[in-house]
Image: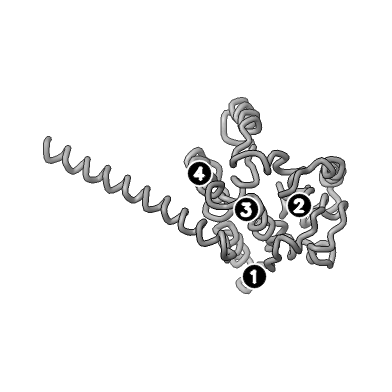
């Protein structure tokens, strides 16, 4: 029994060490990205693999655009649509999380969102889109690290350049060119609100651009944009 106990302790210590090293790898990536732009995110790799199953020569459309060259209209629209408290919180919107948990309890499973822009970016950079409490826990740890090593402008800049906006479309520049034939620097308030409205379900709206729900969400976001606080 003593031998078994020693082995169990060693295994547990090894697992703890692996977990710590795994978190340090995340932290190292985030520190690197404070100055250098990330390449493909985990989420982008997953989507590309899905596209290649149907079309082997498929590729993603993405073009990095510096923060200053992205329309303020789009920044305001995304803040208004996704995370009104982005500038003020430290990674988590506790009120939004509580509402999401209440919805989850009613449904009996993890269905509601409540994620901030920082949490969404943490997921897109490193994790899978599957819903689970383990993934949400890892997402929370990465979010804490990100908020401590990056300022809000850098977090938002990366987010704007890597989020999904359609079938194989990633980032503001590719989205603006795909839907409107212009640069992300030229987006009008109406165009920006429309793009922000697409974020929760971009692949669906890519092929259903006249969906009534999209039009109503666009109008709501447009009305909220003047009050949005942009980093």
Q: Secondary structure at mark 2?
A: helix
Distance, label 1 to label 2, CA atoms, is 26 Å
Rendering coords of residue 135 (x, y %): 50, 44
Residue depth check, mark 1 versus mark 3: number of the one nearer the observer: 3
Give the SS element for disc 4.
Answer: helix
Q: Is residue 153 left or right of residue 138?
A: right
Dot placed on the residue nearer the N-terminal end, 3 or 4:
4
Q: Nearer the viewer, mark 4 or mark 2?
A: 2
Q: Are marks 2 and 3 in contact (CB under 8 Å)?
A: no
N-terminal label among 1 and 3: 1
Q: Are marks 1 and 2 in contact (CB under 8 Å)?
A: no
Q: Secondary structure at mark 3?
A: helix
The disc, 4 or 2, on the residue closer to the chain's N-terminal end is: 2
Earlier-in-chain disc, 1 versus 4: 1
Residue, far left: 2
To which residue does mark 4 refer?
135
Q: Residue 92 appears in which quarter of the rendering?
A: top right
Q: Earlier in the sequence, mark 2 or mark 3?
A: 2
Q: Is residue 112 above or below residue 122?
A: above
Give the image location of residue 121, x and y in percent: 60, 51
From the image, tell me which residue sits under label 1: 59
Which residue was labeled with disc 3? 155
Instruction: Tell me if residue 107 can be seen.
Output: no
- Name the residue that disc number 2 marks: 75
Q: Is residue 135 left or right of residue 206?
A: left
Whether the residues at callouts 4 and 2 have beta carbons within 8 Å, the answer is no
């Amino acid at each position: 029994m003593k031998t078994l106990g020693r082995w169990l302790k060693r295994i547990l210590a090894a697992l703890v060490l692996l977990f710590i090293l795994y978190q340090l790898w995340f932290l190292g990536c985030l520190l690197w990205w404070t100055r250098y732009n990330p390449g493909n995110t985990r989420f982008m790799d997953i989507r590309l693999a899905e596209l290649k199953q149907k079309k082997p020569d498929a590729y993603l459309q993405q073009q990095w655009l510096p923060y200053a060259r992205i329309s303020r209209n789009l920044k305001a629209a995304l803040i208004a649509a996704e995370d009104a408290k982005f500038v003020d919180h430290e990674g988590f919107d506790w009120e939004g999380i509580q509402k999401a948990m209440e919805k989850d309890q009613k449904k009996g499973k993890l269905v509601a969102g409540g994620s901030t822009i920082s949490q969404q970016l943490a997921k897109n950079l490193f994790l899978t889109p599957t819903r689970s409490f383990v993934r949400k826990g890892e997402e929370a740890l990465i979010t804490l690290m990100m908020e401590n090593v990056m300022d809000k402008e850098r977090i938002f800049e990366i987010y704007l350049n890597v989020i999904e906006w359609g079938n194989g479309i990633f980032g503001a520049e590719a989205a603006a060119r795909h839907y409107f034939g212009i640069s992300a620097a030229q987006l009008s308030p109406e165009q920006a609100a429309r793009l922000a409205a697409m974020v929760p379900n971009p692949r669906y709206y890519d092929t259903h651009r006249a969906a009534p729900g999209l039009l109503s969400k666009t109008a709501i976001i447009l009305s909220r944009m003047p009050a949005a606080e942009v980093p």
